[in-house]
Image (spheres, grey):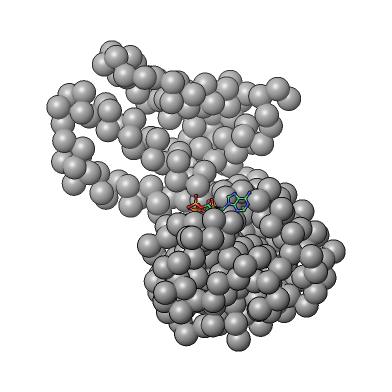
Amino acid sequence: MTVTVLGLGEMGSALAAAFLAGGQRTTVWNRTAGKADALVAEGAVRAGSVAEAVAESDLVVVNVKGNDAVRAILASAGSLDGRVVVNLTDGTSGEARDLAARVSDQGAAYVHGQIMTIAPAIGHADSVVFYGGDSAAYERHREVLSLLGGRGAYLGDDAGTPALFGLAMNDTMWGTLNGFLHAAALLSSEGVEVKRFLEHATASLSGLLGYLPSLAEEVDRGEYAVPFGALKHHLPAVADLVRESRDRGIDDEFPSYTLRLVRAVVEDGHGDDSYSRLVERFRSSPAS
Ligand SMILES: NC(=O)c1ccc[n+]([C@@H]2O[C@H](COP(=O)([O-])OP(=O)(O)OC[C@H]3O[C@@H](n4cnc5c(N)ncnc54)[C@H](OP(=O)(O)O)[C@@H]3O)[C@@H](O)[C@H]2O)c1
């Protein structure tokens, strides 16, 4: 079994290195040819063109910056007949589905992969990569792909799902990080070490993570009634956070946005519902 890697940036180089470390014959191509030198020194085969690289392997892995580049690279390959293209380039679910259709028109099977880790963690047992698309093609190459991360998960035959999962994870991450760093600004304005706060907050933060499954269930069922901890009880606390931020001369846009959301949902008559009711607000754009 051989594998071709198209794109040798920070991530593509890590992918090719993991295939090599796993004993795979690995053919590599990059727009800037010199980036292949280190991998070639480790045993990779250098291809002079995309078409040459694609001709070498049944499994063609693509990892570049942006799906416009993926489209251009695959278009330059000519025929992809009988190949399995695994695109590990970040983008939207729509871009992944569009690529799946284009690749299928070129005669190949398409699998989309969403890498959930940074380049140095590629190849580690606990690194996560989500996959979606052609199930037979994924099964055929599952073992080779597991060299990239021990926790690969196939999410179904929709090529868009891995990208959606990746974006949902990032959405959760940035919301959480923004809240934490706003809190860090609040604490440090008082000269409090953030590390000291964390020592005391760990139990509450674990509780927050433990709260997510019940929110998920409420959203999935579309039922938001709760016996306690309703939205109306959040409202004064969010208002306190806005005032505390202003009093300290700290940017209050982030908590003010939360205040606007919570207040609007309470004013719509849902103050006795769970915090999860906010999902209905997010579902409609402000313009609608
Ligand atoms: N780096 C990470 O830790 C990480 C983590 C998770 C996901 N990812 C994802 O992995 C993908 C690659 O990221 P990266 O960090 O490896 O980026 P990078 O280091 O900036 O490398 C970009 C790669 O894309 C190629 N490229 C860009 N435009 C091209 C074009 N028009 N035609 C041909 N090749 C083109 C570059 O070729 P040249 O060398 O010729 O410029 C290079 O191989 C992205 O989707 C990124 O979001 C990266």
Q: Nearer the viewer, residue 122 or 167?
A: 122
Q: Does residue 242 appear to the left or right of 262 in the view shown?
A: left
Q: Residue at x 49, y 56 (%)?
A: 9
Q: Does residue 233 appear to the left or right of 82 in the view shown?
A: left
Q: Nearer the viewer, residue 170 or 266?
A: 170
Q: Residue at x 48, y 35 (%)?
A: 230
**Image location of residue 173, percent across then percent down:** 45, 45
Disc tally is: 0
**Image location of residue 101, percent across then percent down:** 80, 59
**Image location of residue 147, percent across then percent down:** 48, 77
Q: Residue at x 70, y 22 (%)?
A: 287
Position above or below: 32 against 198: below
Position above or below: 213 against 48: above
Q: Does residue 255 appear to the left or right of 192 in the view shown?
A: right
Locate the C terminus by quadrant: top right
Is residue 138 among what the camera can see?
A: no
**Image location of residue 114, percent across then percent down:** 57, 59
